[in-house]
């Protein structure tokens, strides 16, 4: 079988149909279908991938024909290059020590600058947020929340939540210092900031403090060394 026809068939299977390939490459769906289904020309030979179609596929799916001999590689490669199926989750913009007058996150061992994930991953792993567009990454800092997470671990926050409407874990600041704590509302006493690490005492956020909520923590990963 012609290597380009084989590659196209594997690409169509990976994308879930010839219409999806045609749409992303800007091709006539019928033309893609004819090659995929093996429609024969008047000469009796099956229709192949012509130069125009090949150029369009090269632009839309770089490397699509190079892995034609390995179906699993095509599928894996396509999941990466199909940008329409991915979302970028960026680092929260105040992460890290921001310089004079900026937010300080103490004992943060480097930063995770961002992730690229599929929309399927978001739907299945982060179902409870105001919007996937509001998600941001914060790199864990300090040891006050151990064993919930360790310094350097990734946390996803929902930046669409900027008030403490119910008890949960929040990313916030008091003055120029950032914190991640479980916040509990105590009537008449304001908010109590609670650490998971028993070595740290609870403390109260009062109305006279310069307090701001950046977001609610919706997902935490804890890394362990092996």
Image (tube, helix red, strand yellow):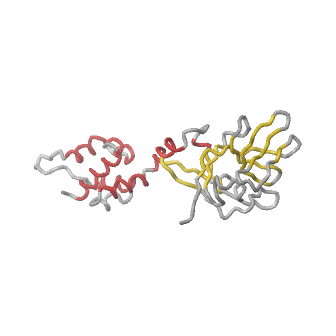
Closer to the camera in the image, 56 or 133: 133
Q: Is residue 57 above or below residue 160?
A: below
Residue at screen point 79% across, 52% down = 201
Determine the residue located farthest toward the bottom in the rendered image. 226
Q: Quadrant of residue 168?
A: top right
Q: Residue at x 82, y 48 (%)?
A: 203
Q: Residue at x 81, y 54 (%)?
A: 176
Tell me: 168 left or right of 89: right
Q: Is residue 65 left or right of residue 161?
A: left
Quick one: 93 or 148, which is closer to the camera? 148
**Position of residue 194 measured from the top left corner of the image (x, y, whole percent):** 75, 47
Number of numbered markers: 0
Residue 82 image offset from top left, x and y in percent? 42, 50
Q: Residue at x 27, y 40 (%)?
A: 30
Question: Residue pushed farthest front?
Answer: 198
Foreground residue, 126 or 205?
205
187 left or right of 15?
Answer: right
139 lies left or right of 119: right
Q: Name the image quarter holding the N terminus.
A: bottom left
- The percent position of residue 135, horizontal first and vertical second, equals 61, 45
Q: Position of residue 137 (x, y in %)?
A: 62, 52
């Amino acid at each position: 079988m012609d290597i380009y026809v084989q590659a196209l068939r594997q690409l169509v299977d990976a994308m879930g149909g010839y219409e999806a390939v045609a749409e992303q490459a800007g091709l006539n769906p019928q033309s893609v279908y004819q090659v995929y289904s093996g429609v024969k020309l008047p000469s009796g030979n099956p229709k192949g991938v012509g130069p125009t179609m090949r150029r369009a596929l090269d632009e839309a799916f770089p490397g699509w024909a190079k892995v034609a001999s390995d179906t699993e590689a095509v599928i894996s490669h396509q999941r990466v290059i199909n940008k329409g199926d991915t979302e970028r989750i960026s680092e929260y913009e105040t992460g890290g020590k921001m310089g004079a007058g900026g937010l300080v996150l103490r004992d943060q061992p480097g930063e995770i600058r961002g992730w690229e994930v599929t929309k399927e991953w978001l739907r299945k792993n982060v179902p409870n947020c105001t919007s996937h567009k509001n998600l941001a990454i914060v790199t864990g800092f300090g040891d006050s929340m151990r064993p919930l997470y360790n310094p350097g671990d990734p946390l996803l926050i929902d930046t669409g939540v900027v008030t403490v409407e119910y008890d949960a874990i929040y990313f916030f600041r008091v003055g120029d210092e950032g914190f991640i704590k479980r916040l509990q509302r105590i009537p008449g006493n304001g908010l109590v900031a609670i650490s998971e690490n028993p070595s740290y005492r609870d403390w109260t956020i009062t109305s006279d403090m310069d307090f701001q909520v950046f977001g609610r923590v919706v997902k935490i990963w804890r890394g362990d060394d092996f």
